[in-house]
Image: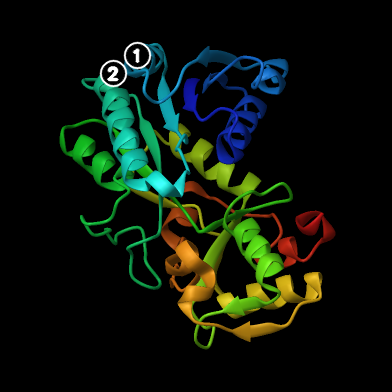
């Protein structure tokens, strides 16, 4: 199978490409430059230079593939709404190139806006800024084989520059590893390489379902995350108001527990990487 993957050099996208290649698939990845994607080229991937604004490039690469995995997203949170709109346009361009065929499109989404303990059947509200889930559903309603892979707030592993690294930075800057309220709001998590397997298994399954949950740890109390960070940094672990976290307060106080039972059953997915707590309790996260 020849798979086109956006976000080729990203935290998730590079792992997806590596997993696809190891499984014997051909891969073309979208990257800003071949120099940045040199490691993937050495593994056997082909690279198309471009960005999410190069809609013709996206359409052409999607049309030449047997399926598409869209992992790219601009995570500049100061312009999140604009980035979500860029993402929507890219997804629609990719979907248009696959329309009228049975070739699958997987897009990347998250758990924000879903109820605690959400399953694959739960739908996010229309008001949220990120539109990947909603756009994939709209494409599927047009007969395009589109589905969303929802990632938890922590896709972890040493080298992670995501939300846990933000919490570590806030703790260092403020001198306290904090949580909001009683800290019993829960995050879910998945080891990066386990997440990559969900994308591969779902594309091999021709995206037969509209939603997959790449969730290994379904409910980790936020206070436990703060406790590990505090112990590793030698800082007190204490409750603080939302203002302590600044712009990140919504995420720090969010309850994003989720089930992946249906995904595990459908794809025979068995995550084997370290748990969120075990993974962040190692020196590499604090180097």
Mark 1 and mark 2 in contact (Cβ < 8 Å)? yes
Give the mark, 2 or 1, whose residue is nearer the N terminus. 1
Where residue 205 is drawn, which disc sits there? none
Q: Identify which residue is drawn at 43% across, 73% down.
A: 255
Q: Identify which residue is drawn at 29% across, 21% down.
A: 98
Q: Mark 1 points at which residue?
A: 63
Q: In the picture shown, does residue 167 fall above or below 8? A: below
Quadrant of the snapshot with the C terminus: bottom right
Describe residue 166's horizontal placement relative to residue 3 as left or right.
right
Q: In the picture shown, does residue 130 fall above or below 101? A: below
- SS for tag 1? helix
Q: Closest to the observer: 134 or 67?
A: 134
Where residue 97 is drawn, which disc sits there? 2
Q: Closest to the observer: 235 or 182?
A: 235
Q: Which residue lies furthest to the left in this view?
A: 142
Describe residue 7's horizontal placement relative to residue 113 as left or right.
right
Q: Horizontal and vertical percent for residue 126? A: 20, 55
Q: Identify which residue is drawn at 38% across, 44% down.
A: 79
Question: Local crowd at mark 2 within 10 Å, few (<14), some, or many (≥20)?
Answer: many
Q: Residue furthest bottom?
A: 182
Choose top left, top right, bottom left or bottom right for residue 38.
top right
Choose top left, top right, bottom left or bottom right for residue 224.
bottom right
Q: Closest to the observer: 2 or 82?
A: 82
Describe residue 7's horizontal placement relative to residue 164 as left or right.
left
Is residue 246 among the parts visible in the rendering?
yes
């Amino acid at each position: 199978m020849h798979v086109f993957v956006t976000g080729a050099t990203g935290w998730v996208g590079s792992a997806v490409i590596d997993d696809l290649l190891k499984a014997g698939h051909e891969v073309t990845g979208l990257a800003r430059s071949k120099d940045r994607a040199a490691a993937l080229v050495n593994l056997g991937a082909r690279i198309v230079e471009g960005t999410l604004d190069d809609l013709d490039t996206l359409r052409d690469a999607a049309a030449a593939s047997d399926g598409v995995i869209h992992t790219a997203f601009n995570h500049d949170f100061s312009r999140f709404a604009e980035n979500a709109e860029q993402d929507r346009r890219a997804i629609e361009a990719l979907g248009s190139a696959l329309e009228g065929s049975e070739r699958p499109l997987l897009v990347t989404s998250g758990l924000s806006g879903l109820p605690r303990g959400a399953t694959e059947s739960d739908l996010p509200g229309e008001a949220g800024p990120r539109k990947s889930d909603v756009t994939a559903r709209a494409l599927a309603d047009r007969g395009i084989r589109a589905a969303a892979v929802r990632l938890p707030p922590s896709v972890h592993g040493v080298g992670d520059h995501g939300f846990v690294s933000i919490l570590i930075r806030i703790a260092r800057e403020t001198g306290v590893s904090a949580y909001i309220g009683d800290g019993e709001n829960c995050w879910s998590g998945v080891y990066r390489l386990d997440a990559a397997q969900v994308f591969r298994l779902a594309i091999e399954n021709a995206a037969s379902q509209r939603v997959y949950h790449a969730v290994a740890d379904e409910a980790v109390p936020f206070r436990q995350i703060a406790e590990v960070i505090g112990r590793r940094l030698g800082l007190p672990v204490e409750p603080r108001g939302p203002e302590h976290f600044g712009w990140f307060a919504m995420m720090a106080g969010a309850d994003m527990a989720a089930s992946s039972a249906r995904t595990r059953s459908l794809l025979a997915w068995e995550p084997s990487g370290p748990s969120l707590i075990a993974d962040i309790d190692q020196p590499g996260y604090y180097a």
